[in-house]
Image: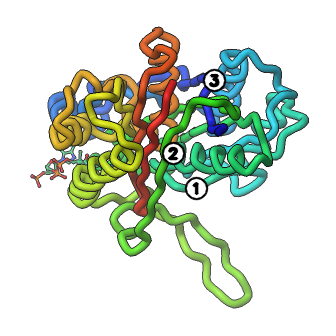
């Protein structure tokens, strides 16, 4: 029985960083508040040359190299993003252009911070269907361009970056994967695009990212462990069998609470949000790439990936590395 295996990873972070101390020079916040409430110390922020597409392409290029493939091997590019600079062409098509992925079809997927998980699941479905064998899956964000830099309750949380994985059909890899949405809760985390005046309707201004932080926090600490337990149970796997739980990097307190609720050792929950902040759809593949390149992952290790965010959306995957 064939499944989907991650065979290469890559990531790209903007050159410039913004530390908590630097933020506290320009707004009423402090390193102490941000660090203790979130675990974040610094984040990368795109400059005028860097976009969701350029970061995605660099992460994708590294993942293709890491997989030992050539650009022409890729048959499909799936890009998860909620902060692309343009409505179209898709980031996927821009990545195709930059990397010369001449044999690939390309498209974007919008599921906010769960985007990478949803894109991975989509790749898995394509592979199981037999339609494609080699797929580049990317999460990329430049959320710094969508947040209100005068709103200290949200702007200190997010960072920019991209992470990518090359997946292909193989005998081992994804064991189980789930994705879920609850559109009735959409209002707790929103960002509205601006619209122009039409003959029938007035122009509507956009709005920067708005978040009811505590509602999202409560949702995450309840739903993520339930979702992980379900994917483990469905696949007859115990929490103890899992080597690492690679969670969306939103807040270290959320991750610690999930570990506690799963009765799992916190050491099994790697984090990099101290230096990256919350990079939304990019956070899981950036962290995976970091772990892969520092040789933390061994062939045969069981991993759980889990994302959650706006929509609301959430999901989890159990896979063998
Ligand atoms: O990836 C998408 C998913 N998003 C998330 O997972 C985010 C989930 N939510 C959270 O991580 C937390 O709710 C936050 C980190 C966003 C906020 O932490 P909190 O413990 O829920 O704080 P709070 O919103 O209750 O605010 C506590 C206080 C308030 O002051 P008062 O009303 O108690 O006087 C805020 O005005 O902290 C104040 N505050 C700040 N103070 C210094 C809010 N932001 C800041 C700030 N610096 N940056």
Report if the CB atoms under discs 2 and 3 are less than 8 Å apart. no
The residue identified by callout 2 is 117
Helix, strand or loop at disc 2?
Answer: helix
Q: Which residue is mark 3?
A: 7
* Residue 110 position (above or below residue 197): above
Nearer to me, 60 or 7? 7
Judge whether residue 266 can be spotted in this image: yes
Residue 105 at x, y = what percent? 82, 46
Tally of numbered tags = 3
Mark 1 neighbour density, 10 Å: few (under 14) some (14–19) many (20 or more)? some
C-alpha span from label 1 to label 3: 24 Å
Give the residue displayed 57% in from the left and 24% down from the top. Answer: 11
Q: Position of residue 80 (x, y in %)?
A: 59, 46
- Where is residue 3 drawn, in percent x and y? 63, 38
Q: Which numbered disc flags the more N-terminal residue, 2 or 1? A: 1
SS class, disc 3? strand
* Quarter residue 215 falls in: bottom left
User: Who's the residue at 54% across and 40% down the image?
Assistant: 142
Q: Residue at x 70, y 44 (%)?
A: 127
Q: Nearer the viewer, residue 135 or 214?
A: 135
For discs 1 and 3, the disc positioned in front in the rendered view = 3
* Disc sitting over residue 61 in the figure: none
Q: Which percent across, then down, holds residue 280? A: 45, 43
Asked if the residue at label 1 sits under 8 Å from ligand 1, the reply is no
Could you give the CA–CA distance between mark 2 and mark 1, rounded to whole angstroms? 11 Å
Q: Secondary structure at mark 1?
A: loop
Q: Classify mark 2: residues with Cα within 10 Å, few (<14), some (14-19) or many (20+).
A: many
Mark in the foreground, 2 or 3: 3
Tell me which numbered mark, 1 or 3, is placed earlier along the sequence.
3
- Badge 1 is on which residue? 110
């Amino acid at each position: 029985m064939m499944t989907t295996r991650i065979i290469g990873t890559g990531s790209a972070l903007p050159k410039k960083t913004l530390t908590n101390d630097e933020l506290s020079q320009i707004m009423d916040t402090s390193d102490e508040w941000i660090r203790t409430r979130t675990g974040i110390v610094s984040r990368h922020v795109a400059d005028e040359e860097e976009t969701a597409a350029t970061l995605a392409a660099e992460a994708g290029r590294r993942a293709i190299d890491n997989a030992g493939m050539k650009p022409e091997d890729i048959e499909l590019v799936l890009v998860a993003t909620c902060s692309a600079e343009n409505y179209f062409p898709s980031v996927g098509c821009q990545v195709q252009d930059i990397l010369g992925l001449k044999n690939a079809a390309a498209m974007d997927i919008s599921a906010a911070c769960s985007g990478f998980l949803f894109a991975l699941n989509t790749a898995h479905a394509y592979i199981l269907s037999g339609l494609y064998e080699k797929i580049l899956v990317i999460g990329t964000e430049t959320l710094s361009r969508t947040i209100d830099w005068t709103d200290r309750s949200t702007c200190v949380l997010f960072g920019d970056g991209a992470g990518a994985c090359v997946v292909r059909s193989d005998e081992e890899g994804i064991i189980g994967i789930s994705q879920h949405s609850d559109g009735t809760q959409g209002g707790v985390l929103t960002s509205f695009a601006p619209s122009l005046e039409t003959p029938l309707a007035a122009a509507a201004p956009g709005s920067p990212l708005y978040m009811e932080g505590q509602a999202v926090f409560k949702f995450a600490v309840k739903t993520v462990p339930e979702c992980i337990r379900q994917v483990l149970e469905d696949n007859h796997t115990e929490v103890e069998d899992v080597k690492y739980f690679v969670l969306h990097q939103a807040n270290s307190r959320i991750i610690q609470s999930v570990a506690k609720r799963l009765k799992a050792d916190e050491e099994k929950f790697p984090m990099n949000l101290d230096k990256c902040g919350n990079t939304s759809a990019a956070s899981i593949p950036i962290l995976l790439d970091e772990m892969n390149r520092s040789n933390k992952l061994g062939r045969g290790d069981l991993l759980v990936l889990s994302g959650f965010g706006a929509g609301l959306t959430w999901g989890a995957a159990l896979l063998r590395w």
